[in-house]
Amino acid sequence: MTQNLLKIENVKKAYRNHNLIGKEISKFSALNGLNLNVGKGQIYGFLGPNGAGKTTTIKCIIGILEADSGDIIIDGKNIKGNGLYFKNKIGFLPEQVGLYGRLTAKESLQFYGGFYNLSDDLIEKRGKALLAKLGLEKDSNRRVSEYSLGMKKRLALCIALLNEPEILVMDEPTSGLDPRGVKALRIVLKDLNKKGLTIILSSHVLTEVQEICSHVGIINNGKLIREESIDGIRKEIEKKSIRLLLKVKEFPEKISNELAKKKRIKSIKQKNNGKHEEITLELKEENIPWITDFLVSKGIQIFSIEPQKNSLEEIFLKETGGD
Amino acid sequence: MGLKDKYIQKSKDSWNKKKTWHPLIISLVLVISLAIIHKAYWVSNTETNPDEIWGNKQITKNGNNWTIDFEEEVGDSITFKGILRTAPKFEVYRNDTFVPGKYSEGEALVYSEDLYGKTMLNVSGIRILVNDDLSKQFYVSEIITIKATLVSNVSTFDNNGEIITLVREGWVAEAEDINLSSSKDNYFFTAELLIFFTGLYLSLKRVTNLREQTGLVWHLAKFELRQGIKSPRMIVLGVIFTLFIIGMGWLLGDLQNGDPESAFFVQNANGALQQLCFFVFFVVSLAAIGVSVDSFHKERQANTLNILLAKPINRETIVIGKAVGLSLVVGIPALVAQILGLMFMINAGDFPSFSGIIAFIVCGQIMIFTLVCFQLCFAIAARSGTDVVMYGLGMWLLFAVVWNLLIYAISFALGIDVTADDFENDPKFQSIASHMGMLNPGYVYQFAVGLLTHRTLAIDLEGIPGWLILLALVLWPITCLRTATKLFKREVRG
């Protein structure tokens, strides 16, 4: 069993608005008793719809916000009162990367590295290695204001990794990145994870979570709805039916009715795209050969078959009450 | 649990929360206790209301026989403590200052040649004749103790053709019976400072990671300095305020040589220095606002703050580091401008006191730090960039431009006729103006320089004792910095 590195217990957090004399005029509860467990060495994907409390949770973990109640325990120690100690162990990559535009990448690393107990030489050495790893070595003497968003994200990741943290917390790490950037980031993260880094990331891009993460937590309305390993979710997906999209020349109503009566078919939908008839069938994966045989035997000309697997997205939508 | 128990529990919790600052809180309580003892010492050992004794004298005019009697007995000695209302150098009797044989109602004595070389002091309203020339020994506004004895003498004078015999009682003292109150105050002040610094030291020792956090303050301050000093805004402001301060320094130096009857005449170099303080404040405060106007707000918008907050640095340290850095951004060019302004002033006029020059520079830097911290409070609390600019400009307008109008308005509301000629010399108006001045960092700067041009802290500037000015000088930056850190720390609670 994986050792617990981060444990969030019944954390509550509300945002308050005060009037000029400091009296509370409104309150919005972002976290309503959140519980969460992240094991050592995991890549933990943190999912939830907008306003679910993902960023608030991340801000509470890294100490930008203080929970109203509950405990955040890292490596068996409560972060309350030990904020600075834990900040030395955590690296953080925010969603909106804000860096000082007048500094070069090297200067940025020197500046942020100055907050850790690291010598200038060590910062330079580590910085150089990180810049090389993230493909910024050539641009290390350019001003950050000249960087693209992707480059800024990579530099921010270098900054987050400079202190060799035990946990890397990332808020929507791929937002604003092009597909090449996403792929590069995925490779870097997997590589870092292999070396023992625990990663916690929040994301809207479910395919990305599915590909990178070893564990997933879904939150909604400030509460954890489900926490599962990605393998567990895969198994669940496999158990469920899949959808099969068929493009055929013609699809007579008679055959449609016949299929609808078959037990192996859970649902059937038909649409004309102007060129073909598009048939969407819901059935178990093991029944794909049977359906193709059946249609061919009925003289249906099939142009394409596209199995559409159930994904994390469906589980996410189901858990969070979406359509 | 009853309300009382709840209150006690709340107080206990609040006290326990401040464990780090217990030594400082205890030392402050001790300092306040000592200050009360200090006050009680003077009240029990000296007469601290000399004007009451002077006011209680009886002047009886019985035909040609006049008497001036005090409630005290002749031969009684009292140690008075009070402020020298006028400069002793203007109070020494010389053969050209009076006509012998004339009666002076204000001084309650008849002028005679015996008075030559003696000094008639006005100590918080009471007149005391000192058998010596005190010019250059004591100065106006200094707080002194003076042991005086009530004596009686008989003199005659001509009152519009009538010869009046005056049996007069009056207070006399010897020069050696006069001391600056600081001769005793210093013991109390030293003890109070020692207690305070011991408390502060013990508290700071309890602060976790103090050394690391101090290093981080400097790390952040250096960064702010490097970023700020090269900014186009600071370059423009720096050039403008340097030229302005140089120009005003030269003008104030030149005005010392002008016509004494002129409204713009400057009496001496120390007076000029105090006026230069205002002009320094006038432009430097604008620069301080200019550099710190968007510090936190801009960072929040640019999202640079989130990465910073995730680093192992306290929120207090971030505010202190930024405050120190931004103060240096303004302070370094201001220091150059101050020195150049002084050079031009000294070149055109006289040399002010050395302590005054030091105060002009050091207190100027404290004033800049105060204004930066003040502005940081707005930058942290404001919701939009426009708010920050408006609050900053409002603050500058209030402190540097319309403050005098505010003083006039309040004085008028308190019954002072501000349309009368010479109302600015009305002691009541001066008292209001100087007390209100404690609420304006620019005035505190001027007062502090005025105070430190003197040789002692035992002085009273228009109703404000020296210790209060120093206290204001220390409290202003601390309060502004504390407010800024508190506002920034409050954000952690969302």
Image (tube, grey):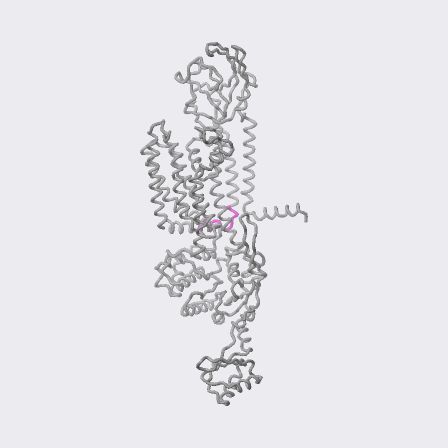
The magenta span reads: B204-216
Q: In this picture, is B482 found above or below A292?
A: above
Q: Is residue B338 above or below residue B267?
A: below
Residue found at the far left of this picture: B347
The image position of residue B67, as x and y in percent, is: 53, 14
| Residue B365 % position (x, y) | 41, 41
Whether residue A198 is visible here, answered yes or no, is no
Where the N terminus of chain A falls, by quadrant? bottom right
Is any part of residue B61 visible from this angle? yes
Quadrant of the snapshot with the C terminus of chain A: bottom right
Q: Nearer the viewer, residue A41 or A241?
A: A241
Residue B459 image offset from top left, x and y in percent? 47, 30
Could you say which is closer to the camera, residue B360 or residue B38?
B360
What predominant SS class does the magenta segment belong to? helix
Residue at the image position 51 percent from the left and 19 percent from the top: B171
User: x, y (%) of residue B477?
Assistant: 47, 43
Q: Quadrant of residue A263?
A: bottom right
- Image height of B81 relative to A290, above or below: above
Q: Quadrant of residue B423?
A: top left
Is residue A42 found inside the magenta-colored segment of the image?
no
- What is the total number of numbered labels drawn onto the structure image? 0
